[in-house]
Image (cartoon, coloured by chain):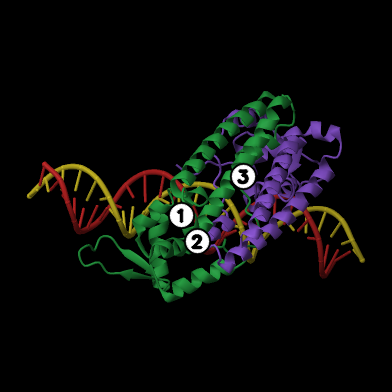
Chain colours: A purple, B green, C yellow, D red
Amino acid sequence: MPAKRILPYVILGIISEHGQLTGKDITKEFTTDIGEFWKSSHSQIYPELRRMTADQWLKIIPDPDNDKEIHYQLTKAGRRTLNEWLETPNESLPVSKDLFSLKMFFIQDKDDPRMTALIDTQMQLVKKNLAHLNERQQLLFSSEAAINQNYGHYLILQRAIARQEAQLTWLKGLIPVK
Amino acid sequence: MPAKRILPYVILGIISEHGQLTGKDITKEFTTDIGEFWKSSHSQIYPELRRMTADQWLKIIPDPDNDKEIHYQLTKAGRRTLNEWLETPNESLPVSKDLFSLKMFFIQDKDDPRMTALIDTQMQLVKKNLAHLNERQQLLFSSEAAINQNYGHYLILQRAIARQEAQLTWLKGLIPVK
DNA sequence: ATCTGCATGTAATGGGTTACATGATTTC
DNA sequence: GAAATCATGTAACCCATTACATGCAGAT
C-alpha cells in the first residue's frame, strides 16, 4: 500500500477557497500561507490537476481570450470529496524530520561545545520564523472581520506562533546551563 | 540536486552510540527513541550499510561463530564524517506535513462543527503522545546520572514534552470558543 | 531431517525534486 | 519581428514503503 496521497485534497481545498484558479495560482499558494506547513511544486501540481480533472473532481472553465491559462473549478464530486476528507479524523501525529533533535540526540556530553552551537543556531532560526509569522498575522488578521472570515487559518497561525514562542522560551532556559 | 540525505548520518550516530551494531539492531532503534523524530525501515538500512561500508565509513567486525549477523563499527573516516555533520549548522526549520493544520486551514467558519471535531481528535492524539513521552522520561531519565550520561537525548525529550504540553494548553483554550 | 523463525536482502511501485522543454504572449 | 517572459508540461533521478525472497539456526 503506497503512502496516503494528500496533495489532491490540498489542491481541492485551495481551489475551493478561491472559486477558480490556474495551476500557476495554486503553485503560488505553496510559497505563502500553506507553505508554512505543506510544500509542493508545479511539476507535481500540473499532472495532479490533469488526473483530478479526469477523475471528475475538477472541471475546466473555458476562457475565450486566453487558452494558455487553464482555470479549474471544483465539481460537485470534488466538493463532496473535499468535505469527506475534512471530516475524516486524523489517525496519528506527524513525525517531523527534525535535524535539531537528531543532532542533539547524538551529543551525549553536557559540556560539548557543539551543543551550545546547535542551540544558538536553532534560536536564530526560531526567532526568524517567529518574526515572519508575526508579520503574517499583522498583515492578514489585523481586523476582527478578517479573523472571522478565515477562522481556521487564523487559528493555525496562532498555533504556530504559540509553538515557536514556547520553543524559544525553552531554548532560552538552556543557555545558563553551560 | 537530489534532497540532502540524512539517513547515513543517523546510522553513523546510532552505531557510534553503541560501539558496534547489526542491521537488525539499528532497525530496532527506529522503533523506540529515535522513532520520535525520525523513521526508517530495514529495507533502507541494509543497502545503506553496504554503501557506507563501500565508502569506508563503516567496517565489518567479523564474528567467527555467527556469519549471519553482521556487526558494523565506525571507521576513523566515519567518525570524522559524523563529527563534521554534527558541527554543520542547520539552515532551516523543518516543514512538518501536518494534517491538523491543513484541515483547519480549509475550514473558514468559526461555527463549523468539523472544527470542533478536529480539535477534539487532535487533543486525544496529543494526550496520548504526551503520556508516551512521559513514560519514556520516567523510564530513561529517573536518575541524575542517566540524565548526564545522555544529555542531548534528555534535552530533546524535554523539548518534545514541553511542545506537546504547550499544544495541549492551546487546544484546551479553544474549547470554550464554540 | 524437516519446520519454523529470524537477519538480511531485493523488487515493484509511487511520490517528490530538479532540470529541462514547449509554445504562446508580451515587450521593445 | 526578435527576444524575453511566462504558464504549462515532461524527463531523470532518488528516496521511501510494501511486499516478497533467501538462507541459516535452532527446535522438535
Q: Is residue A139 left or right of residue B43?
A: right
| Cα–Cα gap, marks 3 and 1 | 22 Å
Q: Tell me the kind of residue under disc 1.
A: Ala
Q: Is residue D9 left or right of residue A105?
A: right
Q: Give the residue at x 45% y 75%.
A: B77
When asked about the image quadrant of residue A125, the answer is bottom right
Label 1 secondary element: helix
**Label 2 crowd (10 A; few <14 / some 14-19 / many >=20):** many
In which chain is the residue bearing label 3?
B
| Cα–Cα gap, marks 1 and 2 | 15 Å
Image position of C26 with respect to A142: above or below: below
Q: Which residue is mark 1?
A: B146
Q: Position of residue B96 (x, y in %)?
A: 61, 48
Q: Which residue is mark 3?
A: B163
Dot 3 or dot 1, earlier in sequence: 1
Label 3 secondary element: helix
Q: Tell me the kind of residue under disc 2.
A: Phe
When asked about the image quadrant of residue A121, the answer is bottom right
Task: Looking at this view, name the residue that lies furthest to the bottom.
Answer: B76
Q: Which residue is mark 2?
A: A106
* Of labels 3 and 1, the one closer to you: 1
When asked about the image quadrant of residue A90, the answer is top right
**Label 3 crowd (10 A; few <14 / some 14-19 / many >=20):** many
Q: Is residue A65 visible?
A: no
Name the image quarter holding the N terminus of chain B: bottom right
Label 2 secondary element: loop
